[in-house]
Every structure is written in structure tokens, then in C-alpha cells.
Image (cartoon, rainbow, N blue to C red):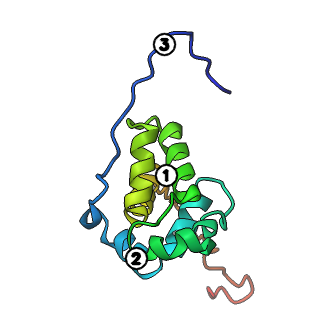
Amino acid sequence: MAQIQPAGAHVEEVEWSTALLDCFEDSATCCYGFWCGPCLSCTVSGRMKECYCLPLCDYCNPAVGIGCCLGAPPCIPPAAFGLRVALRHKYKIKGSILNDLCVSWCCPMCSWCQMHRELKKRNTTPNVINIQNVVHMQPGPMMNQSTGVMY
């Protein structure tokens, strides 16, 4: 059920859980982004309930793709920018569209890594372990009525 905020109600915004260049906060994400950036960006897209292949538009576009892998692309990668804005709005993270635009253009891989770290921290679910006491009962010894011997 959706909650309706009254007009003029202020929603408290939070900071990103990690900074843009905090690769050592989660070295697994950093390695994932370094060795297979397109895979990382597709994972982020899927975790945001978007099409897994959406970020491939950034990599397949010749004007964007080579720049995404080597540094700043010549134009803004639309999937990186759009998903960053969507993630920031979904979790009410402080920032602006101009900041998202600059981050997506200057360092798209750092942006994808930051989004991945954010989703990992926010989508963690506690592990519930259900332990049941199981009692195995075996029938007691029986006695042969005719011989009086237990077996």
C-alpha cells in the first residue's frame, strides 16, 4: 500500500552508503566492475527491476561504449545516467540531476560500482534459520510370550 505524503511534507534524504571512489569498501564489486564492467552494469539494472540488457545500450553505442571502457565517454551514457537518477530517487539519496549527469559522464564505471554497492547494502535480507528439534523414537524391546526372551 502506497503512502501519500501531504503537500509540503519534507522527506528526509540520506547520503550514499559509500562514496563514489570507495572501491576498497567492497573490493569484490570493484573487481567485478574492473574485469567485467558490462556484466556489473547489467546486474545493477536487473536488481533495480529493469531489463538486464538496458546498460548494453551504453556499451553498444560507438559514441559511448569505447569511452565507458577507457574513461570519460564523448557523450553521456543514457542507461548509467537514467538508472543512477532512478536509484537516487527510489532510496531518497541526496544529490541532483546535474551531479548524476557529471558522475555518469566523467566516471561511468565508478558510478556503476557505487550503485552496485548501494543495492548490495540496501537489499540485504537477514538469514532466517529454522531449527526444529526432531526426536526419533524407536519401539522398546519386545518380549516373546512363549519363550520369555526379549528381542
Q: Which of 144 and 102 is in front in this view?
A: 102
The residue pinned by badge 3 equals 9
- Give the percent coordinates (x, y) of residue 17: 33, 47
Please rate how many residues cluster around mark 3, counting C-alpha atoms within 10 Å: few if below 14, some from 14 to 19, many from 20: few
Please rate how many residues cluster around mark 1, counting C-alpha atoms within 10 Å: few if below 14, some from 14 to 19, many from 20: few
Q: Which residue is drawn at 46% across and 66% down?
A: 73
- Give the percent coordinates (x, y) of residue 22: 26, 60
Q: Is residue 25 left or right of residue 114?
A: left
Q: Distance between the residues labelled 3 and 1?
A: 27 Å
Q: How far apart are marks 3 and 2 (CA)?
A: 43 Å
Circle number at residue 70: 2
Please name which of the two marks, 3 or 1, marks the residue nearer to the observer.
3
Residue 10 visible? The answer is: yes
The residue pinned by badge 1 equals 123
Q: Which residue is drawn at 68% across and 27% down?
A: 1
Q: Which is more N-terminal, label 2 or label 1?
A: 2
Residue 73 versus residue 96 in the image, above or below: below
Q: Nearer the viewer, residue 75 or 124?
A: 75
Residue 55 versus residue 148 in the image, above or below: above
Q: Residue at x 35, y 45 (%)?
A: 16
Please name which of the two marks, 1 or 2, marks the residue nearer to the observer.
2
Regarding mark 2 in the picture, which secondary structure is present there?
helix
Report the label total: 3
